[in-house]
Amino acid sequence: MSFHPSSTSGHQPLEIVVIGAGLAGSEAAWQAAQRGLHVTLYEMRPHRMTSAHSTDRMAELVCSNSLGSNLADRALGLLKNELRRMDSLIIRCADATAVPAGGALAVGREAFSAAVTDAVTGHPNITVRREELTEIPSDVATVVATGPLTSPGLAEAIRRLAGQAYLSFFDAMAPIVTLDSIDFGIAFRQSRYTPIAAASEQETTGDYINCPLTREQYEAFVAAVHAAEKNSLSEAEADETARRYFEACLPIEVLAARDVKALSFGPMTPLGLRDPRTGRRPYAVVQLRQDNVAGTLYNLVGFQTNIKWGDQERVLRMIPGLENAEFVRFGQMHRNTFINSPALLRPTLQWHDRDDLFFAGQITGMEGYVGSTAGGLWAGLNIARVVSGQRPLTLPPVTMLGALLTYITAAEGANFQPMKANFGLLPPIEPLIRDKRQRYAAYAVRALAALEAVLLEEAALQP
Ligand SMILES: Cc1cc2nc3c(=O)[nH]c(=O)nc-3n(C[C@H](O)[C@H](O)[C@H](O)COP(=O)(O)OP(=O)(O)OC[C@H]3O[C@@H](n4cnc5c(N)ncnc54)[C@H](O)[C@@H]3O)c2cc1C
């Protein structure tokens, strides 16, 4: 692979700082360097490691080696195509080190991060400094991309800048699925303790979606939860979990390990529900509650879990009605540092009251490897524009990246949680295309055309 930086036109290059050489930081540094800026990239590893990283490489994948779907009509596939169109370093290295994985883009973990490290360290416009920063520089344009495991010293500096209420340190998140992907041949809408007379009406209007389980299905599910591979918590995280999660909010695997019936007395209780198809109370249920205003996303109520993402998908698909569910977020309980982006960031990824400070990656709530990369790319592009005296760009929400940027900067701030790329974030196409695959394909065509228009504008605005 060869990478060619654009010329700096003989002038002294403009300086910027990027903090964190993960997926977002490596991409941001690369994009800014390609646009002729001189980047000092700070990475604290190997002198100071996180609880999830184990090498000194850039863009180390901390868990799965899959970057998700590579299909053009899937949300993550579309986001990758948008990134390819914008010459993403991370996606280029992923394509170059891909391993067979069906419709997904999985990579040889070490070859991938070695390729990113070589490209970044070999770039003439990037200087890498292996140091932990504990303050955000105030005298130079900066991208903060220190990820979910931002070092405590820097997290404290961010907290001071943002305000106490605007930085979350620890997360218990339940999985989220798209409404479209729930099988309503099995699942039914109903709120608990609905008067029998109104039950038929509730089938279409009840606030909750219920996935009923027979005793056999329930017991098989509990056994699978029990056997699934879990992310291990560090001692500090385990203490934090114990402190923050009282009995009513325990992870499902903790309940499953206690007693085979524990989940059916907890989040999977069928009390007050009646399956309209059998007229009887199911043995157990999984309830889903609306998660976004548009009503396209639903979370699994009480299903916070620390099961590893690969196993989690397999186990959750055992729930009747969710066999083909599209998971836009998995449950997790690890430390996850993220800022309240709706209150603090603009859709350009600029800090609300400082034009030359940008945040990117998981710390902004753009969830997952590819979401984090996408934020890095956009911050790198925009910081280059801002320090060169150009106006920063925004992307229309019909693009997948634009939809994510809109979500993290305009979501309801009080309950803001990270979000993965998913079609539920895109404005619908009118009139509605009923066939899901055709609809998603149309979203992809619309997104790439809209992106093209913005990139043409960027090219036209180049000095
Ligand atoms: C345990 C765990 C498992 C995950 N599993 C998956 C998964 O399977 N699939 C998926 O899509 N997503 C997963 N994620 C979510 C997320 O996509 C990844 O964490 C992703 O790496 C985020 O990219 P990033 O660039 O924002 O942060 P990171 O890739 O973590 O990069 C941040 C970098 O900043 C450095 N840094 C931190 N503080 C400082 C400092 N003060 N000074 C200098 N450098 C600093 C870190 O060492 C790190 O290299 C997981 C997250 C965690 C925590």
Image (spheres, rainbow, N blue to C red):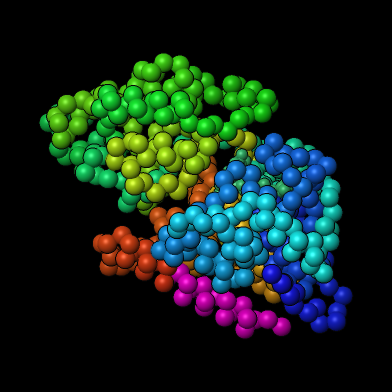
Q: Is residue 453 magenta?
A: yes
Question: Within the image, what quadrant is residue 252 found in?
Answer: top left
Name the dominant secondary structure of the magenta segment.
helix
Image side of residue 57 versus residue 251, left or right: right
Magenta-tinted stretch: 446-463
Q: Nearer the viewer, residue 213 or 402?
A: 213
- Percent coordinates x, y for residue 361 in the rendering: 63, 53
Q: Furthest-left residue in view?
A: 197
Quadrant including the C terminus? bottom right
* 190 versus 402 height, above or below: above
Image side of residue 57 versus residue 181, left or right: right
Quadrant including the N terminus? bottom right
Residue at 33% x, 42% y: name it.
322
Asked if residue 383 can be seen in this view, the reply is no
Residue at 35% x, 27% y: name it.
220
Q: Nearer the viewer, residue 80 or 154?
A: 80
Residue at 77% x, 47% y: name it.
56
- Percent coordinates x, y for residue 164 in the rendering: 67, 38
Asked if residue 84 can be seen in this view, the reply is yes
